[in-house]
Image: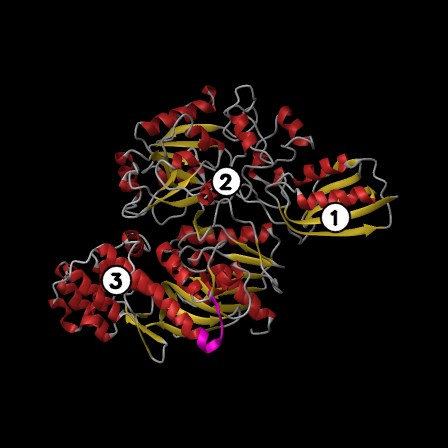
Amino acid sequence: MITRVQILVRGIVQGVGFRPFVYSLAVKESLKGRVLNTADGVLIDVEGDRLSIERLLRAVEAHAPTLSRIDSISRQDLSDLARYPDFRIVESTDEGGKFVPISPDIATCRDCLAELFDPSNRRFRYPFINCTACGPRFTIIEDMPYDRGRTTMRDFEMCEACRVEYENPLDRRFHAEPTACAACGPRLSLKDAEGDEVAPDPLGPEDAVVRARRLISDGRIIAVKGIGGFHLACDALSADSVERLRRKKFREDKPFALMACSAEAVREYCSVSDAEKSLLESGARPVVLLERKKDCAIPEAVAPCVNTLGFMLPSAPLHYLLLEHSDRPLVLTSGNVSDEPICYEDGEAKERLRGIADYFLLHDRRIHVRADDSVTRVTGGREMVLRRSRGYAPAPLRVSPGFARQILACGAELKNTFCLTRDDYAFVSHHIGDLENLETLRSFEQGIEHFKRLFRLRPEAVAYDLHPEYLSTKYALSLDEDLIRVGVQHHHAHIASCMADNGVEGEVIGVAMDGLGFGSDGRMWGGEFFVADFTEAERLAHLDYIPMPGGEKAVREPWRMAAVYLERALGEDFMESALPFIQDMDARKWATLRRMILTGTNSPETSSMGRLFDAVSSLLGLRGVVNYEGQAAIELEAIAERGCAQRYEFEVAGNGSIIKAESVIRRAVEDILADVSPQVVSAKFHLGVAQLIAAVAGRIRDERHIDRVVLSGGVFQNMFLLGRTRRLLKDEGFEVFTHSRVPTNDGGISFGQAVVAGARIGRGRI
């Protein structure tokens, strides 16, 4: 008996070969009907034998294309037959306010890679080879549904050979929207810093790559246009080249990212576990932080004073060609001047990078949305995303029970992302950066408008940080007065973000530790213990407040925090100590700062654990002034003696609510004066913080009978601290939750804001 069924598949199902996959199943089962992309997903309208239809449905669920992600499948049995003559793939439809998730940009697949290096293939050495299983997606899409005419590939008319593949349902390039070849698609060019072409087009695109590779070998810096923006490339084994890039980029110490041709090549320089290898080779191709080997040949200038290196593997055909016939890694760092967004337009890159790059390896495929590299690592056997961008965004995160209203969450100031919600989806944006200049703010605003257009969103509420001076907060408050406004405390957003990341509901013990976040009392928090759920966060304990002389200047100059803590711990005459730190300190500057503290002049109080890490780092002589965020704490972690079992003890006062660090500082000073190594002092401090977290969590459990602990905030990017804290908590019987899909740093704040706003609105708490 012939029956008709309509099946709607929702999720990441467009641009990933889903329709030809369904077509091949239907033909195999001798079914008739249609499959098409709609603005709500992939619609399968099929007629035939009921058992055959059931087999098709089971196959769709069990064997969907690798890059797809099915969120839901709904079916409707219809009584009327359409009497289709065959099974076809038909054109997409755009249905008003409906939407469908979009695939991120995906690294070159094995099939395309084989063709890239096959001399008999017509795409041999073509730098823009792709298919439905790989290639650019998010960065070239201008609107939905995902069709070529709504991408930047509309600038290139397909040749007949590409058209045949594109229209053949059994070809892996069927409706692969970026499909192209050397005869009809994007082309490379190599230009010098003045804009003059070095490798004219008649010589062929491969000549541009070969010449660029030779220039890198000769010590030159090349600006390379990739999928989501420009990189700056140089020979990673040449200390002179790396140091020259640092000088020209104005990037004093912050580590550079590296690219190698394979995981085996990475193993020459770093330890690589099976989980890390899988992450390196994943379709997202993130930068993976790996432990540097002791005999590593990578120059110190690539990543000064840290024990990790950030490696990635090629994510585009052009990268494979640049690394062809070579095991030497490249520095491949974001194409920008420090603190500016990554360049993604040719004119912008030529203007902003001409003082850095000697040559430009360009192509003429427009990038619609800039997307910097994602950064991730493995901890506790699973991935921990530190920067979520290319390869991950804009894949949505599913949130239960979903959102009753569409919400725009504007995130924080540093490592900004924004988040938009719809139904049970949270669309966390690609990494925007620090909202400290006009260009980054413009990227933030443009990104929000692009997401609203792609996902057919009209936010009814806006969530924002409580800090009145954040540009993200000012943007939120400048929007339409009809929007529901939800201010979310910074550290509550951190905890909620981690809860939603792990699908945790109900009350938890929340531990939020970071650099700075505006507290509900108007002071700067950062060493906090809460009992929290998605709607509220009750603060039960925190690090004692301490002044930050000079405000933001104290963040950039950790020696100020060290001096403040020393006076707290040793008294006003601490300057008489024989500490090397004090011998190097400017007494007149300190006298000025002390007057500022006494008079309350530009000395905001903070409970930040991040600032305490800074102080200990400075006491040890590691870092009195920082050149990038978190540098002092990162270098303190890098030297910690992993075999140490001793720890410092914190004092707890105020009925267990105030945590004092003076005893830790005194013990550290005693050890330094006794010539205990900085490595051991660092370890004893780290282990003291881990024990503190376990002890305070234990006290809260005794009072509130909660045995779930959530750890969030930038301090928990410290793998030594995180690992020891997690172990202590688990030994005490706690269930411990840490971040995986969204960053533990401020890159996850927007997600937490959205979840809190959604819960408050849904439960009538607004």
Residue 538 bears which disc, if any?
none
Location of the C terminus (image quadrant): bottom right
Residue 367 bears which disc, if any?
2
Q: Is residue 551 left or right of residue 492?
A: left
SS class of the residue under badge 1? strand
Q: Amino acid at mark 3?
A: Ala
Residue 478 seen anywhere in this rendered image of the structure? no
State the image quarter where residue 688 is shown. Answer: bottom left
At 50% from the left edge and 41% from the top edge, which residue is drawn? 282
> In this rendering, is residue 131 above or below 638?
above
What residue span does the magenta drawing correspond to?
701-709
Residue 102 seen anywhere in this rendered image of the structure? yes
State the image quarter where residue 416 is shown. Answer: bottom left
The earlier-in-sequence mark between 3 and 2 is 2
Q: Could you tell me residue 430's position as x and y percent?
A: 49, 50
SS class of the residue under badge 3? helix
Q: Amino acid at mark 2?
A: Ile
> In this rendering, is residue 452 above or below 480?
above
Q: Is residue 622 left or right of residue 406?
A: left
Q: Nearer the viewer, residue 443 or 402?
A: 402
The earlier-in-sequence mark between 1 and 2 is 1
**Crowding near the residue tagged with mark 1, few <14, some 14–19, many ≥20 C-alpha atoms within 10 Å:** some
Q: CA distance from mark 3 to mark 2?
A: 43 Å
Q: How is the image coloured?
A: secondary structure
Task: State the residue position of label 3.
Answer: 615
Location of the N terminus (image quadrant): top right
Q: CA distance from mark 1 to mark 3?
A: 60 Å
Q: Nearer the viewer, mark 1 or mark 2?
A: 1
Task: State the residue position of label 1.
Answer: 7
